[in-house]
Every structure is written in structure tokens, then in C-alpha cells.
Image (tube, rainbow, N blue to C red):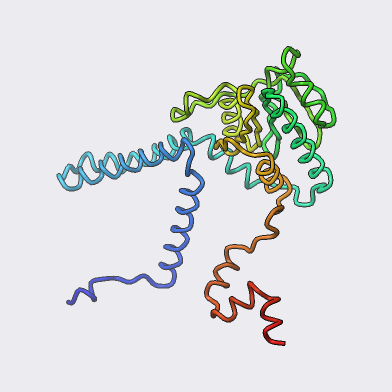
Amino acid sequence: MTLQDRILFPGFNGLLEIAVLAVAIYYILLFFQGTRGAQVLSGLAILYAALIALTYFFELDTLNWLIQRFTVYLSVALLIIFQPEIRRALAELGPRHLLGNHVAERSLVDALIDGVRRLTENKIGALIAVERGVSTAPYQGAGTPLDSQVTPELLATIFHPNTPLHDGGVIVRGSRLAYAGCVFPLSQKPELSRALGTRHRAAIGLSEETDAIVIVVSEETGSVSVAYKGRLRRGLEIDRLERFLANVLLRARVARGPQPSRLRRWIEYFRSPRQRQRAYNPAKAESHGA
């Protein structure tokens, strides 16, 4: 029997299963990339693989059997460890308002940008959370209900030093400023820089627990940061902040126009050079043909 006869090649069903598993693993790793769960997941995977390899090569059959049976309990532990990431993923899979009020969202972005610009010019610290799919109700208890229209003047007044509500954060729900003076949870990530203040840690903490967009203005430097999905983007210019808010809230590529999907980019890649030239330069191709 030759080596080729010993190798069993998967059929169509086998190839389909491999493709599905590869895509699932890729998107799981992509989702956990840059989060606290990524370090825990990589550590558990390395530890589990090392234990399996050691027990197999040294023929520790009893320990190998115990480790394999332990995977049942490990799945429960993973649900507990990755509870924030799983909750955020399920929230993103939930129903979305696909036909939202575009005009109201555009006016909200403009009001937030004008307000942040005023705060940065005067170096006034601020913490602004824009609620999306996951409710921020657990963090509204310590706040003051307002239910007011979002205006730059109102934001500047709330966060002005020595005012009663300037220490906490504000929550924007829909196109209304719902609560002010709220206390957000602090992030417990050990890798965070010690230079980050309470506002930045609170912004990251709320973005870990919900899918809210949290804007931070530093009162020391006037710099702008945005926390989203547990990640902090620091030192944003006003125009970059506007593009980011528009991309997330309006679901539109404001500066660059609509972008082709990944499938379309693959189709364009496998076209002939002449077809790609016509696809990306239609005006030039038409003039050349005329």
C-alpha cells in the first residue's frame, strides 16, 4: 500500500465542513482581537495544547483521559470568562433599525461635533456616551434625568467646572440627552497605560459592557478620544471624530463614498487587467473607446 492510498482525502461534505470551521475560527479570532478575552483565549489554548501533548508523548493515559473529559466543564468556564464579549456579540446580532431617521442622526452628529469642538478649545473635560443597541440603564441610577435636545451650549454648560453635573458622564439616547452625572464602570484591563485618567478608564469600561460610543475630552490637554467595543482611540482630530461618528451612526462612508463589499473586491481582483481598468476608471475607458 502506497502513501497515497493511506491518505484519505475529504469529499465535498468534508471540504464544506473545513471551510465552515475555518471561517468561524477566523471571525472568532477577529472578534476577540485587541480585547481582554484575546489574551485569556490564547493562554487557555496554549495551556490546553501543551497538556495534551505532554500526556500523549509521555503516555500518561489517565491524565490524558481526565483532560479530555475536562473540556465539558471548560465550556462552562469559557461562558463565564468571556461573558462581556459574548453579550456584546449577541447584542450586535440583535435587530437593528435599518430605516432610522437619517436627518435626526445627522443633526446629532453635528451637535456632538460642535460641542466637542467647544470643549476642546476651552480644555474642559467631558465624558459623552451615545447609546446604541445595548441599554445603559444599569448606569443611569446615579444620574440626573434631563430628556433634552443635544446642543453644543448644553454640553458646554454641563461639563463646565464647578457645575453640579460636570464630574459624571452624559448619556445620549436617540437624538436626546437622556441623563447627566452618570457613573460609568471602570475598565479592569491590566494592560492599560497608567497615564489614563478616570474618564478614559470609565469610557473603556462602558464600551466593554455595552455597544455605546463614548467620547472623552481631556481637561489637561484638550485632546479627544473615543472608546468603542472596548478599544480606545486617542488623539483624534475633530474631522476624524466626525467621520468615525458618521460611519458608525449613519452607516455611511462620508469622506470616501460607498465602498465595495469584500465579495465584489474579490471579483474585481480576478478580472482581467483590461476589465479592472474599465471598472475602476469608467470615464477613461469610455473616452478611450470613443
Label tally? 0
**Outermost residue toward the left in this view:** 58
Q: Nearer the viewer, residue 10 or 165?
A: 165
* Residue at the spot 55% in from the left edge and 22% down from the top edge: 197
- Left or right for 286, reference 187: right
* Residue at the spot 26% in from the left edge and 71% down from the top edge: 7
Residue 175 percent location from the top left of the image: 80, 37
Residue 137 percent location from the top left of the image: 70, 27
Q: Nearer the viewer, residue 206 or 282?
A: 282
Up the image or down, 135 lies above or below 184; here it is below
* Residue at the spot 74% in from the left edge and 22% down from the top edge: 180
Up the image or down, 278 lies above or below 83; here it is below
Residue 230 percent location from the top left of the image: 55, 36
**Outermost residue toward the bottom in this view:** 290
- Left or right for 129, reference 230: right
Up the image or down, 286 lies above or below 62; here it is below
Q: Quadrant of residue 120?
A: top right
Position of the N terminus by quadrant = bottom left
Residue 65 percent location from the top left of the image: 25, 43
Q: Nearer the viewer, residue 221 or 94?
A: 221
- Left or right for 11, reference 61: right
Position of the C terminus by quadrant = bottom right
* Residue at the spot 36% in from the left edge and 41% down from the top edge: 71
